[in-house]
Every structure is written in structure tokens, then in C-alpha cells.
Image (cartoon, grey):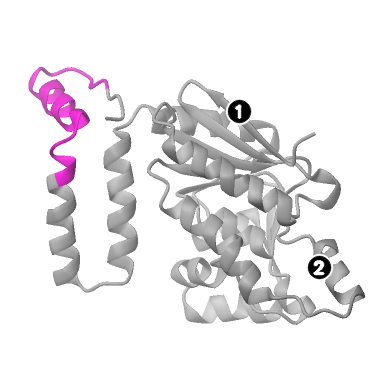
Amino acid sequence: MSSILLEKKEGIAKITLNRPEVLNALDGPSIELLDKTLSEIAKDESIRCVILTGTGRAFCVGIDLRYMKSFYEKGEKFDYGGFLRKNFNRIVLKIVSMPKPVISVINGVAAGAGIGLALSCDYKLMSEKASFVEAFLNVGLVPDTGSCFFVLKNLGLSRAMEFFTLGETIDAKKALELGLVNNVVEEDKLNSRAEEIAAKYASLPTKAIALTKKLVYYSLNHDLEDSLEYEAYLQDIAGATEDHAEGLKAFLEKRKPVFKGK
């Protein structure tokens, strides 16, 4: 059975991390396959929304520590920096730059790098029984996979420091209160709700969503003047899309637009 499952249906691609025996921890081969899958979906114009989730009782608990064990047994130093640059960093950037919306469906515990993967998605849907667990400090490491960036942007300095340094668990209810996720639902309704949200996204103007993602991340790190100029630049691009023409025509004809993601 593949460590990464991919299902495509009605414009929606569902990626499932499938290593339940290790709580969907990722090793080299599974990360490589996830990276390849994301690249494939990014280029597939028939796909207009992506779901990222896990099998079993976990979303993802980050790197598979057994993968690193062989290095220590041979007395070799594990190249953490090189590993992150080649693997998890690329995954996060591919999710953020994906030219279509990505929904993380957090079905269970997300820990370590799994937190970064979950929070890098555009919409975060969480099971009421799921949780975020800061696990880096337990093995003497710092947060990676964008975890610090995303948590800090959502929680602010004081709460982010508390989360990362005390290593306390954040349950689904608290995650929603803190703004880490968009919605929390009952466990048995998680998949149906995810499908509803994905179908909604798949019906929207995909290219405009892709451009909006670019604008949001640009605006996070630039001043107002630069952001205004970037808005104007992207609006020129959006204004030339087929979906804009359809949206404008539908508005004038007082009907619901039928977007094609073009």
C-alpha cells in the first residue's frame, strides 16, 4: 500500500498521508512521493481544490524518527538543515504557492512538522477529537516546517512562545478559539464537511483564488504602499481571466456565474 494516497473526483484532489502504523510520520520516500504528488496536482488544470488529510488516528506527527535512527547507529551526524531545505521546506512552499485552494482536514493529532503542514494550508478543518502537540522541545529541537511562522502569525508573540516552550497540547476547541483553524466538527462529520467545503471552492474562480493567495502572503511581509502596488499588478492579471468575464456577465444578467477556473 502506498504511503501517499491520491484520489481525484469532480475537480477535487484528495491527498491522504497513509502510514497509520507510525501516526503518519514521514520518512524520506514518503516525503518524496508527497512532493511529487503536489507537483502533479499543481499542473493539473482539472483540479480546482485540494484536500490534505491522514489515515487513522493522526494527521501527521512529523518526521519518522526511525528514519534518523540509522544515522546515529552508524555514528553519523544527521543533516537537519539539509534535510529540511530539501524536503519539508519544499513541501510547505508548494502548498502555499499551490495555484488552487488547499484544505487541511485534521483528523487526529498533528505534532512536530505535522503542525506546519496543517497550518500551511488555506483552510483548516479540524475534528473535535484532534489536537496540536508541540513535540520539538521534547527531543531538543526547534520548531520547523514553517510551524513558528504560522503559529506566530495567528497567536502573537506571547502565546506562540508559550506553545513552543512549554510544549502543551492544544485541543480542537482551543485551536478554534485561538484562530489556528477555521472550523471544528464532530469526528463522524469531518469527511462530509470537508467534501462540502472542497466542492464550494471547486466552484469558485480558481485563478482569482491563486492570485489572492499570492497577495495575502505578499502583504504579510510588505508595507501598505508596496501591497497596494502589488494589488494593482495582480488585478490586471485577474481582469484578463475568463472567469472575470463570466462573473461580470453573470452580474449584469442577474444570474449565478458558472466559473471554469480559467
Residue 238, percent from left and from top = 18, 41
Under mark 2, the amino acid is Met
Residue extending farthest to the left is: 252
Closer mark to the observer between disc 1 and disc 2: 2
The quadrant the C terminus occupies is: top left
Give the distance between the C-alpha atoms of the residues marked 1 and 2, in whole angstroms: 30 Å
Q: Which residue is mark 1?
A: 7
Can residue 143 be spotted in the picture?
no
The reply to whether dot 1 and dot 2 touch (C-beta < 8 Å) is no
Judge whether residue 180 is colored magenta.
no
Judge whether residue 250 is colored magenta.
yes
Asked if residue 83 is positioned above or below residue 140 in the image, the reply reads above
- Snapshot quadrant of residue 70: bottom right
The residue depicted at 68 percent of the width and 74 percent of the height is 80
Q: Which residue is mark 2?
A: 68
Look at the image and give the residue range highlighted in magenta: 237-258
Looking at marks 1 and 2 on the same chain, the residue that comes earlier in the sequence is marked by 1
- Snapshot quadrant of residue 188: top right
Observer-nearest of 95 and 127? 95
The residue depicted at 73 percent of the width and 61 percent of the height is 63
Residue 212, percent from left and from top = 29, 49
Asked if residue 253 is positioned above or below residue 217 in the image, the reply reads above
Observer-nearest of 85 and 134? 85
Q: Answer left or right for 42 relative to 159.
A: left
Secondary structure of the residue carrying tag 2 is: helix
